[in-house]
């Protein structure tokens, strides 16, 4: 197990370095001069040149990248060009709102999608299976922003039951969570249905039935434990999608998360803030997947054996 953990941590570090490279160089090739944007129309060419020099933007890209790596290794991500405060502090102020929204959407997805997918598989070919399949197709085909707007119009504006925007209370969280979770519920319910159908036809379940074990115990005590492995994998991947997809949802509902911060930072060429948002999102995504890999070993001991063999 220690070798397995060390190998996975090494792979995670390489992935993070790749994210750093891509984020850094892509931002530098975008059109627009951060120094000119910061000084706006009040800056003279001399002042813009001086600001570029002080920000290190006149240095070659490889030199800027090495300086940036040094800052990251020391925990110093630079100062926000728009807010004139440490970029990491600015992002950490917005992160709790996004995590709150993403975790609520993920929890709702698990509570709704897994039972729905399991029920559809156990009632294969019936009207229950048909209804779940239609809902899954609708959920994956409708854009997130359109779902959010429809919820605002028909649930918030016409009934007044819930606020159309804002942050702070549970009532503010309901509609953004529904919007963000809708497509995830559709995806996970379909995956759960397929996974359960694959497991219930396995020989070891037939053997369990032949021993006289009740059908409910066969399914819930033996079948679902193996069927849930691909579902857990997808949930880990979807957490990254939820963090990234929250950009649209936060914009629709005025949610003060890192998605809204990222949009404003990109428009103002605030490189340090954009880099911290991308790096932090990637780090959370990689960490979640690392934890899932370790969880596999608990749920399925064969995975640890294969890890030792390799």
Image (tube, rainbow, N blue to C red):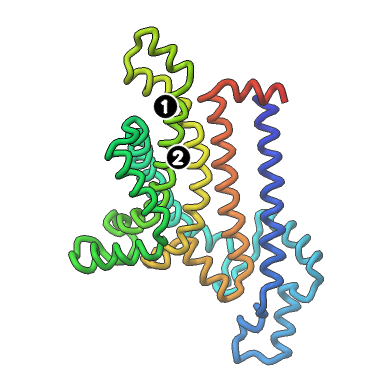
Instruction: Report the Cα–Cα distance between label 1 and label 2.
Output: 13 Å
Tell me the SS state at disc 1. helix
Q: Residue at x 47, y 29 (%)?
A: 198
Q: Which residue is mark 2?
A: 191
Q: Are marks 1 and 2 in contact (CB under 8 Å)?
A: no
Name the one closer to the observer, 50 or 293: 293
Q: In the displayed orientation, state which residue is furthest to the front.
A: 125
Relative placement, left or right, of 258 versus 13 is: left
Residue 79, quarter of the rendered image = bottom right
Residue 32 higher or lower than 158, as above or below: below
Residue 11 higher or lower than 57, as above or below: above
Q: In the displayed orientation, state which residue is furthest to the left.
A: 159
User: Residue 215: horizontal and vertical position, in percent?
Assistant: 33, 18
Q: What number is the disc on residue 121?
A: none
Residue 206 higher or lower than 109, as above or below: above
Relative placement, left or right, of 129 versus 260 is: left
Mark 1 surroundings within 10 Å by alpha-carbon count, few (fewer than 14), some (14 through 19), many (20 or more): some
Residue 290, quarter of the rendered image = top right
Name the one closer to the observer, 161 or 179: 179
Q: Nearer the viewer, mark 1 or mark 2?
A: 2
Residue 146, quarter of the rendered image = bottom left
User: Residue 176: horizontal and vertical position, in percent?
Assistant: 35, 58
User: Residue 122: horizontal and vertical position, in percent?
Assistant: 34, 30
Q: Residue at x 29, y 54 (%)?
A: 170
Q: Which residue is mark 1?
A: 224
Q: In the displayed orientation, state which residue is furthest to the top.
A: 211
- The N terminus appears in which quarter of the rendering? top right
Tell me the SS state at disc 2. helix
Mark 2 surroundings within 10 Å by alpha-carbon count, few (fewer than 14), some (14 through 19), many (20 or more): many
N-terminal of the pair, mark 1 or mark 2, is 2
Q: Residue at x 49, y 61 (%)?
A: 258
User: Residue 207: horizontal and vertical position, in percent?
Assistant: 44, 12
């Amino acid at each position: 197990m220690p070798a397995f953990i060390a190998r996975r941590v090494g792979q995670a570090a390489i992935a993070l370095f790749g994210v750093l490279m891509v984020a850094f160089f892509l931002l530098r090739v975008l059109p627009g001069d951060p120094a000119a944007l910061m000084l706006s129309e009040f800056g003279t060419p001399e002042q813009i040149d001086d600001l570029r020099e002080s920000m290190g933007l006149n240095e070659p890209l490889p030199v800027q990248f090495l300086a940036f790596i040094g800052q990251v290794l020391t925990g110093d991500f630079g100062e926000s060009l728009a807010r004139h405060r440490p970029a990491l502090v600015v992002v950490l102020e917005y992160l709790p709102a996004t995590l709150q929204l993403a975790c609520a959407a993920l929890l709702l997805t698990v509570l709704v999608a897994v039972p729905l997918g399991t029920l559809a598989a156990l009632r294969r070919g019936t009207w229950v299976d048909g209804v779940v399949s239609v809902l899954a197709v609708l959920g994956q085909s409708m854009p997130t922003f359109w779902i959010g707007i429809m919820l605002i119009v028909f649930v918030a504006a016409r009934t007044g039951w819930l606020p159309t925007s804002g942050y702070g209370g549970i009532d503010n969280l309901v509609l953004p969570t529904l919007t963000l979770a809708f497509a995830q519920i559709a995806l996970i319910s379909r995956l759960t249905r397929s996974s359960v159908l694959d497991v219930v036809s396995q020989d070891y379940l037939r053997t369990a039935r032949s021993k006289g074990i009740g059908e409910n115990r066969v399914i819930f005590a033996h079948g679902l434990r193996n069927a849930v492995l691909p579902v857990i994998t997808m949930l880990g991947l979807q957490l990254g999608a939820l963090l990234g997809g929250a950009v649209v949802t936060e914009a629709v509902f005025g949610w003060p998360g890192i998605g809204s911060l990222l949009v404003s930072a990109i428009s103002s060429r605030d490189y340090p803030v954009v880099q911290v948002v991308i790096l932090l999102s990637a780090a959370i995504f990689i960490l979640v997947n690392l934890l899932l890999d370790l969880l596999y070993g608990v749920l399925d001991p064969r995975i640890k054996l294969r890890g030792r063999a390799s």
